[in-house]
Image (cartoon, grey):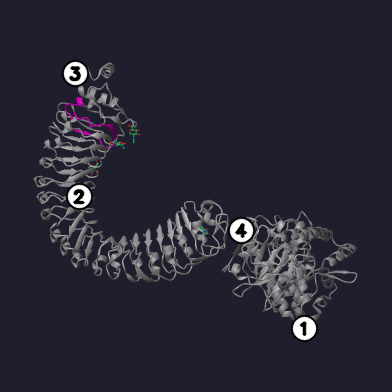
């Protein structure tokens, strides 16, 4: 067999006839056909040349009597190559179907000469060239032919009209041109004619009525012109007529009213004129009627109401006037109605929103009066009422349109607010309410519409903020809010809408800075915030590296390379520093020990042979004190402006910028404060920085701590993480951290301002010193204990307890400040730590000096113990006498041992304090100040004990023995 095939291939085609008798023609023909093909999916692997016949091969069917091939069906086999002459050997072939492959080349004119071929389907291949005239010259028994979806050109051959046995002709989707052959209507048996999507032209001739059996005629998308043949009504079997998108003109021929079997009539996209005739109501089987994009005028015929099977009606883009007939309420099967772009004048009939209509398009059709939406319209999926003159409010129950997918009410005269029920449109993916006069806010309920892909609210009068709840609309790709009066910041939550592509917030009153997180939006194509009041630096990274300048223009306070405005070193500038504030003399306002006194204390302490930890601490203090001063001066240099000069007049070229974060409330700190942070506003100095008081625009006072250890500060990220953690802590007895401000060279912490000054002042310094009663002192001790206990519950160690860090409010309640700041240091270096809290000498737990002991909350308990004793005795933890140093703890402990502890209580209270409370409190203080950490109680225990002490009926003496 191989040899025979070899001979055939070498000698073909000249010797075919002489070798005829040697082979089974079918096997030979198919093998030759296969040999010329590419079969990338090996679909024809079963085609074996050694077989006696081809009847079992894939795609092959044989006549049961003759065992000769009668059908070859290779649809969708991904074959490519030419349709080879080998097939011509299949003398008994009746059906050849090679649809959906990749055959190329021209059509073989000899194919129909095969003895009994009835069906030939070459659709959806890559055939090109003309349809050969010879093809139809002897078409014998050919009944169905499809060349649809190829690349055939030229005209339809005249010979086609000789193939009178044809029932189906499908030449759609090619590049055929020219006119219809003159004898076309000779094909009396034609049932299906599809010539759509070609370049055919000229008139469609009369005489079509001889096609009694024609059911389907599709001439869509050609260049046919003139009238529809007047006798088309004779084709009584017609079910589908599609003449859409041609150049047909004139009136609809009257005979069409006889097409009572017709269920689909498409005449859209032509130039038909005049009224739609009343007889249209005779086409009782119509389900689909498309008269769109013609020049029809007049009223819509009342007889449309007779079309009870009608499902889709498209009358859009004509010149219909009047109103839609009430009779159409009988079209009970109507699903989709498009009457947009007409000249209606009447009001919309109520039936539109009744029953099961799914899609209503009334765009630019000029009806009057807004229809009321009813619960019954719950099945509505598409509602397009755009570009009309609807005036009124949006129906508050718009959410009742629970199946709505597409809502377009743009370009009307709607006013009032957007109903909250908009959030109930769970399936809507496009909502367009743009170009109206809507006011009020964008309701936060919008987050409920979580299928939204496209939200357009531009060109309205909307106010308020962009609701952060929009983050729940995770499918959003397009968010267009331009041209409103929206204010407030752009919510960072937008950054969670990862599908966003187009965002337009331009021409609003938005303020604040652009959230950095926006750089995460990886699919952005446009992001327009121009003409707002956006300030601060443009985010760097992602889309924002290439954002066009016009998208950010019109925001005078925005900086960054794109807007060609360098970001000032400190920006926004809440403060102007007094040039003298970091110079010498600063220490004079310190409530703590001056420089001189420290030096004195060194000699004094060494002289009395104090514990080793104090010595180490003091040496570290001296060294670091010098270091801190010099680094402070350096850091302050670029920030120093001479008093009164406008800082913005001399922007620095430093690329660093400031970042202001408020944990609650608005950041109107930026705009609000013009306060000069100079010595007049200075509240005090501590180990971590100088504290100033300033007033926000809203009249609220805040305390601002300028950290003076900038060279020791962690990276911005770590700094922010730690500060945010501290900002979360809220307790009645803790000073609230309200926000912070960061630049590489300057860090500010913004605290709640507590008006009455520090505990230190109340006890030792101020004019209030006499006023503290025992009750008040006890309250202060208990409050401090509660604050500290809360801090420890959130795993934060204060590290810096001392009476200057305890603030007293107007009701004489204590608030602990400055907590947790040691966490801002790059590491908990004890050296630095002990130097930063240098002034806390006497509060410092002994384990600080001991490198091998872990520092825990217990060091705070020690400090608390000392504080407690300070409050009770009114004495500083370490008092410097003429030639002596008195350590408070030791003094009190000694007094207790000698049984004269009551003498330790502040002399200002002598005679007016309850000793049944004072003595246990002092004992508690001493236990807290134990040298061994494990001997000290937890702060929650301390709180419990204090509450017991406060209640004199309990046996507090036993408790503390
Ligand atoms: C179709 O055939 C041509 C060559 O004739 C080839 O370049 C092309 O990739 C084929 N296409 C498919 C989809 O197989
Ligand atoms: C003509 O053939 C194309 C491609 O196979 C097909 O999509 C179309 O439905 C056919 N036309 C008719 C009227 O059946
Ligand atoms: C279709 O045929 C034209 C020539 O008639 C040729 O230029 C074009 O490349 C062909 N297109 C395809 C997709 O084969
Ligand atoms: C984004 O979503 C995540 C997870 O739901 C959430 O934790 C985060 O806070 C959101 N981000 C913003 C900026 O809202």
Q: Which residue is mark 4?
A: 567
Q: Secondary structure at mark 1?
A: loop
Mark on residue 17? 3
**Residue 901 highlighted magenta (yes or no):** no
Q: Which mark is first along the chain, 4 or 3?
A: 3
In this rendering, does residue 793 appear at all? no
What segment carries the magenta color?
88-110
Task: Classify residue 679 by image quadrant.
Answer: bottom right
Main SS category, magenta section: loop
Residue corresponding to mark 1: 912
x, y percent for residue 252: 15, 55
Q: Quadrant of the C terminus?
A: bottom right
On the rendered structure, is 476 left or right of 255?
Answer: right
Marks 1 and 2: which is nearer the front?
2
* Spatial separation of the CA atoms under disc 3 and disc 4: 90 Å
Determine whether, in the image, residue 834 is placed left or right of residue 46: right
> Within 8 Å of ligand 2, the CB of disc 2?
no
**Residue 731 makes an appearance in the image:** yes
Query: x and y percent of residue 735 in the render?
Result: 66, 70
């Amino acid at each position: 067999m191989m040899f025979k095939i070899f001979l055939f291939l070498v000698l073909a085609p000249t010797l075919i006839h002489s070798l005829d008798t040697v082979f089974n023609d079918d096997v030979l023909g198919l093998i030759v056909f296969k040999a010329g093909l590419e079969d990338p999916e090996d679909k024809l692997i079963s085609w074996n040349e050694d077989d006696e016949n081809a009847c079992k091969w894939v795609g092959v069917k044989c006549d049961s009597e003759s065992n000769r091939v009668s059908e070859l069906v290779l649809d969708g086999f991904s074959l490519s190559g030419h349709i080879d002459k080998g097939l011509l050997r299949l003398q008994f072939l009746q059906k050849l179907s090679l649809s959906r492959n990749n055959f190329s080349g021209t059509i073989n004119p000899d194919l129909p000469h095969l003895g009994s071929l009835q069906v030939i389907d070459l659709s959806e291949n890559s055939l090109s060239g003309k349809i050969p005239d010879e093809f139809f010259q002897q078409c014998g028994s050919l009944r169905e032919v499809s060349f649809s979806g190829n690349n055939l050109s030229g005209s339809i051959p005249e010979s086609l009209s000789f193939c009178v046995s044809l029932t189906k002709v499908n030449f759609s989707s090619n590049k055929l041109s020219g006119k219809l052959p003159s004898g076309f209507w000779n094909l009396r048996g034609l049932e299906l004619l599809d010539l759509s999507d070609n370049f055919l032209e000229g008139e469609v001739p009369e005489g079509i009525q001889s096609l009694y059996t024609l059911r389907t005629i599709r001439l869509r998308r050609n260049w046919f012109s003139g009238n529809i043949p007047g006798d088309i009504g004779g084709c009584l079997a017609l079910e589908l007529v599609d003449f859409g998108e041609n150049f047909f003109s004139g009136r609809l021929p009257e005979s069409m009213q006889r097409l009572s079997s017709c269920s689909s009539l498409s005449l859209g996209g032509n130039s038909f004129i005049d009224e739609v005739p009343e007889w249209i109501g005779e086409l009782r089987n119509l389900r689909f009627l498309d008269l769109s994009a013609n020049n029809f005028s007049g009223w819509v015929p009342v007889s449309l109401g007779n079309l009870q099977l009608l499902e889709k009606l498209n009358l859009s883009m004509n010149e219909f006037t009047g109103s839609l007939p009430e009779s159409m309420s009988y079209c009970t099967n109507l699903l989709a109605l498009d009457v947009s772009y007409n000249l209606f004048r009447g009001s919309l009939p109520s039936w539109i929103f009744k029953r099961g209509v799914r899609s209503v398009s009334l765009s630019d059709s000029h009806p009057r009066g807004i229809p009321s939406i009813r619960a019954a319209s719950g099945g509505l999926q598409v509602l397009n009422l755009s570009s009309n003159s609807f005036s009124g409010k949006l129906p508050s129950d718009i959410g009742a349109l629970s199946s709505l997918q597409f809502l377009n009410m743009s370009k009307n005269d709607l006013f009032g607010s957007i109903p909250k029920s908009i959030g109930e449109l769970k399936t809507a993916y496009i909502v367009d309410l743009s170009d109206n006069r809507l006011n009020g806010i964008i309701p936060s309920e919008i987050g409920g519409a979580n299928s939204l892909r496209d939200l357009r609210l531009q060109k309205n009068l909307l106010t308020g903020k962009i609701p952060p709840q929009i983050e729940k609309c995770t499918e959003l790709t397009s968010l267009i809010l331009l041209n409103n009066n929206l204010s407030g910041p752009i919510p960072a939550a937008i950054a969670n809408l990862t599908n966003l592509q187009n965002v337009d917030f331009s021409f609003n009153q938005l303020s604040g800075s652009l959230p950095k997180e926006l750089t995460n939006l990886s699919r952005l194509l446009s992001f327009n915030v121009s003409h707002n009041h956006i300030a601060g630096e443009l985010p760097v990274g992602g889309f924002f590296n290439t954002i066009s300048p016009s998208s950010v223009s019109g925001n005078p306070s925005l900086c960054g390379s794109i807007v060609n405005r360098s970001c000032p070193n400190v920006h926004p500038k809440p403060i102007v520093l007094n040039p003298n504030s970091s110079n010498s003399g600063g220490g004079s306002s310190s409530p703590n020990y001056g420089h001189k006194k420290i030096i004195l204390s060194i000699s004094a302490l060494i002289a009395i042979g104090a514990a080793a930890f104090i010595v180490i601490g003091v040496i570290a203090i001296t060294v670091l004190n010098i270091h801190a001063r010099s680094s402070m001066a350096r850091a302050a240099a670029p920030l120093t402006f001479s008093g009164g000069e406008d800082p913005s007049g001399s922007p620095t070229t430093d690329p660093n910028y400031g970042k202001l974060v408020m944990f609650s409330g608005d950041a109107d700190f930026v705009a609000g404060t013009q306060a000069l942070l100079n010595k007049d506003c200075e509240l005090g100095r501590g180990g971590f920085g100088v504290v100033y008081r300033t007033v926000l625009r809203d009249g609220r006072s805040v305390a601002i701590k300028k950290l003076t250890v900038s060279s020791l500060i962690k990276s911005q990220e770590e700094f922010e993480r730690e500060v945010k953690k501290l900002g979360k802590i809220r307790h009645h007895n803790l000073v609230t951290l309200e926000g912070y401000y960061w630049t590489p060279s300057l860090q500010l912490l913004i605290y709640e301002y507590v008006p009455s000054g520090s505990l230190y002042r109340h006890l030792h310094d101020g004019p209030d010193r006499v006023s503290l009663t025992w009750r008040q002192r006890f309250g202060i001790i208990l409050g401090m204990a509660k604050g500290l206990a809360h801090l420890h519950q959130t795993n934060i160690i204060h590290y810096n307890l001392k009476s200057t860090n305890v603030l007293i409010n107007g009701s004489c309640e204590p608030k602990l400040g400055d907590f947790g700041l040691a966490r801002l240091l790059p590491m908990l270096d004890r050296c630095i730590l002990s130097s930063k809290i240098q002034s806390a000498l006497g509060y410092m737990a002994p384990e600080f000096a001991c490198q091998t002991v872990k520092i825990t909350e217990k060091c705070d308990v020690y400090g608390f113990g000392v504080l407690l004793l300070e409050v009770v005795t009114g004495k500083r933890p370490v008092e410097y006498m003429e030639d002596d140093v008195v350590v408070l703890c030791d003094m009190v402990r000694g007094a207790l041992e000698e049984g004269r502890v009551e003498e330790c209580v502040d002399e200002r209270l002598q005679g007016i304090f309850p000793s049944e409370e004072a003595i246990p409190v002092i004992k508690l203080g001493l236990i807290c100040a134990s040298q061994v950490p494990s001997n000290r109680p937890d702060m929650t225990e301390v709180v419990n004990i204090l509450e017991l002490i406060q209640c004199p009926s309990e046996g507090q003496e036993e408790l503390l023995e």
